[in-house]
Amino acid sequence: MATSTSEQRIHNEGVKKRRFRFLYSKKVAPYVFVSPFIISFLLLSLYPFLSAINMSFQRVLPGQIDYIGLHNYSRVFNPTFYTALQNTTIYVVWTVLILTFIPLVLAVLLNNRLMTFTNIFRAAIFIPALTSVIVAGTIFRMIFGDSEAAFANQVLQFIGLDAVEWRYGAGSGMFLMVALASWRWIGVNILYYLAALQNVNHDLYEAADIDGAGVWQKFRNVTFPAIKPVVIFLSTITIINGFRMFEESFVFWETSSPGNIGLTVVGYIYIEGIQRNDMGFGAAVGIVLLLIILVISITQLVLTGAFKKGDS
Amino acid sequence: MMKQKKNREKAMVIGLLIMFVLIAGIALFPVFALVIASLSPASDLMRYGLTGELFLSAFDFQNYEALFGSGETNYWSWYANSIIISAVLIVVSLFFSSMVGYALALYSFKGQRFIFLLVLVIVMIPFEILMLPLFRLMTSLQLVDTYLAVMLPLIVAPIAVFFFRQYAIGLPKELMESARVDGCTEYGIFFKVMAPLMLPSFAAMAILQGLSSWNNFLWPLLVLRSNDMFTLPIGLATLLTPYGNNYQVLFSGAVLSIIPIILLFLFFQRFFIAGLTSGGVKG
């Protein structure tokens, strides 16, 4: 009895093995490895993407869906959307300028062979990236409080300027959002640049020294070409992240800022799509946002020649 | 001549050091200010914001006492939710993403280039554009207000796939051959031979994935409905109202919310720079 069951089991395992043997071949294995991505791509990227396009032509009401053609799109281009787009664009320009240029300068200085305590500085400037926007924003709201006694206003008054009601002006509101993002990300970008600077070929500096090149010439002809891929990489992700911005605005004003000074495109999608339950319209704003991002990314990649190199 | 040059270098180093001490100060100041705020009486903060008086005359632990003592908010549920969601996401997303990245780097198969291209395209497409349809999907699957709804979109992270691929490209392919000769299956090769070689990239991705799920905001804001299901950022944000009545929990809670992510960072940081170099920035 005992032997027959164990024989049976061996037989069963044999069948199982044969049935699944194809999964073990060298040809099929890579497909098994990439299958999680394929499944998640189909279910969580492609389906919602097509669904977003579809939704943008719909009026979605509880229990009722109507196709209304381009109506949502014709509604997108309204003054509130333009305000959101303008805020977002200004935010993108500032963050790109600040987050690609300043970290580059600081990384070059930090990478100086005479520099000491580099590791401590590196750790210190990375700390802000660990905080969530909500935690960081909470403290920014305290530092840049509206009362004259708030820290930032005391500093302003100390140097002879007037106190500012930070969260109530368009300029100071933008300053808050850009400052918060810059504070959180400068350290990360410095790390990216430092990593790239370590790959610069030192023989080239020596050759440049022999040729009598100055500091600026060395930077232009040796350092910059080596870190150019990082400059492109960081400016690209800063642009994309800038157009996705929502949290920096949410933490200062939740969803309604005075005169929409803090309204962003994604914030607009959130308000219309979720809060007002107008999903079709929200989807249309999303598609417009996608087109804007695509045009900018492709233009940027063509201009910087990133397409010429291939993908490895 | 020599001496003059030396002096100039010395002056430059001192200048640089002063500058970086200032920069490190700016970087650390808000975190310092948060700790100070958490130790100040909440009534003052509500009235004035954070004032110039940054050095406390006496430590005041009443904010922390409020946080630990009372059941007023669901703070500890938020904490538990954040820990569970982030821990599961780190493990699952690293597992799947590393498999995909590894296969893209070290096998050659039909459709490989196309799949890699898809990975890059998805990295470029903002999640916010897909969020409304995904939200509708979660609603129809009746997953709203569950852990699963928060986690599903992040289970395979394209950016992590990309990192793992860049890292795996540098691994010796010959090891796979010799493992095959020894009778190892393709899966055995990955789990027993190659994955251990990829450990530094796992550490770097654990930090980045941990950071992004711990601090994730917009998606959980959409799919989490009941207060006791909130994650820390969502829960803390509910305390941030103009009429805020719970500054005590807000500040002490914000301080405590940073601790797990700092521990994760300290634990894996040795590998972090290596991870940054291997992903994304190879020109």
Image: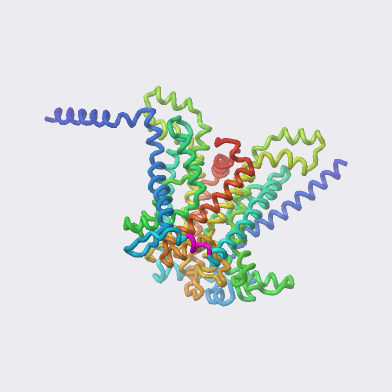
Between B194 and B168, the residue placed more toward the observer is B168
Query: Where's residue A250, x and y in %?
Result: 52, 65
Between B235 and A101, the residue placed more toward the observer is A101
Can residue A97 be seen? yes
The rendered magenta stretch, by its main secondary structure, is classed as: helix
Which segment is the magenta one?
A73-77
Question: Residue placed farthest to the top in the image?
Answer: B181
Vertical order, A147 against A118 (above or below):
below
Image-based side of B235 in relation to A265, left or right: left
Vertical order, A83 against B20 (above or below):
below
Q: How is the image coloured?
A: rainbow
Quadrant housing the N terminus of chain A: top left
Where, by quadrant of the figure, is residue B72 drawn? bottom left
Which residue does the image show at 44% across and 34% down from the upper left? B111
Which residue does the image show at 49% across and 64% down from the upper left? A75
Between A17 and A50, the residue placed more toward the observer is A50
Question: Residue placed farthest to the right in the image?
Answer: B1
Question: Residue placed farthest to the front in the image?
Answer: A69
Quadrant housing the C terminus of chain A: top right
Image-based side of A212 in relation to A272, left or right: right
Does the segment drawn in magenta span residue A118?
no
Q: How many marks?
A: 0
Can residue B228 be seen? no
Query: Where's residue A194, x and y in %?
Result: 64, 44
Query: Where's residue B13, x and y in %?
Result: 75, 49
Query: Where's residue B17, x and y in %?
Result: 72, 52
